[in-house]
Image (cartoon, rainbow, N blue to C red):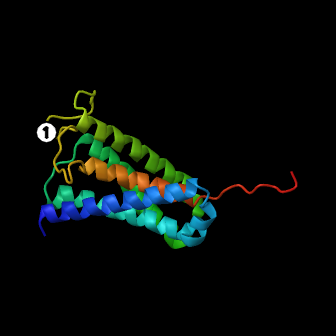
Amino acid sequence: MSIVFVANFLAVLALGAAAIALLLLVVDRIGGADLLRSLLGRRMALALAALVAAVSMAGSLYFSEVAGLVPCVLCWYQRIAMYPLAILLTLAAVRGDQSFRPYAATLAAIGTLIAAYHVALQRLPGLPSGSCSIEAPCTAIQIELFGFVTIPVMALIGFSTILILLFVTRERPTEDPSE
């Protein structure tokens, strides 16, 4: 399989995940939270989040180990957030363990912030990037598809999708009718 084929495949998956995540967020915001929980279910949301994390992890490993792309420091930080998510969300989905959600959301939020900064660095190279090295600069765009999808953009979509899946199927406080 060529690097171009895999990169295109992963970019299309990322864009599809972004579209679905945005749709879920819109439905949740217009009052369809109960519908989402009944259609999607909390356990299925965990499974989908685990799938997103696993594909993200596999994609990052493919780019570095098969394609030979050298990850920059920010890519490593994103991996530090994503790899445990792949394992822990899978375990939570298999066990139906809803108590893990806050911890997964924290890791995903940290990854989202790092990925967003990384995307900003690539688009605005004048930003301070103190942790970047000459061998693997954080501003370098190694792959760009559809005019804007880079590896950090795919990571940002992955982390954001995980956050949205955890958010829209969260436990909501019930209102007490006696008040």
Q: Does residue 142 appear in this view?
A: yes
Q: Does residue 97 appear in this view?
A: no
| Whether residue 30 is situated above or below residue 37 in the rendered picture | above
Q: Amino acid at mark 1?
A: Glu
What is the x, y in percent for residue 96? 56, 70
Q: Quadrant of the N terminus?
A: bottom left
Q: Is residue 162 left or right of residue 179?
A: left
Residue at image coords 29%, 41%: 119
Residue at image coords 47%, 53%: 163
Nearest the viewer among 136 and 166 is 166
Residue at image coords 64%, 59%: 171
What is the x, y in percent for residue 58? 28, 63
Q: How many marks?
A: 1
| Whether residue 3 is situated above or below residue 102 in the rendered picture | below
Which residue is identified by label 1? 135
Q: Residues within 10 Å of mark 1 (few under 14, many from 20)?
A: few
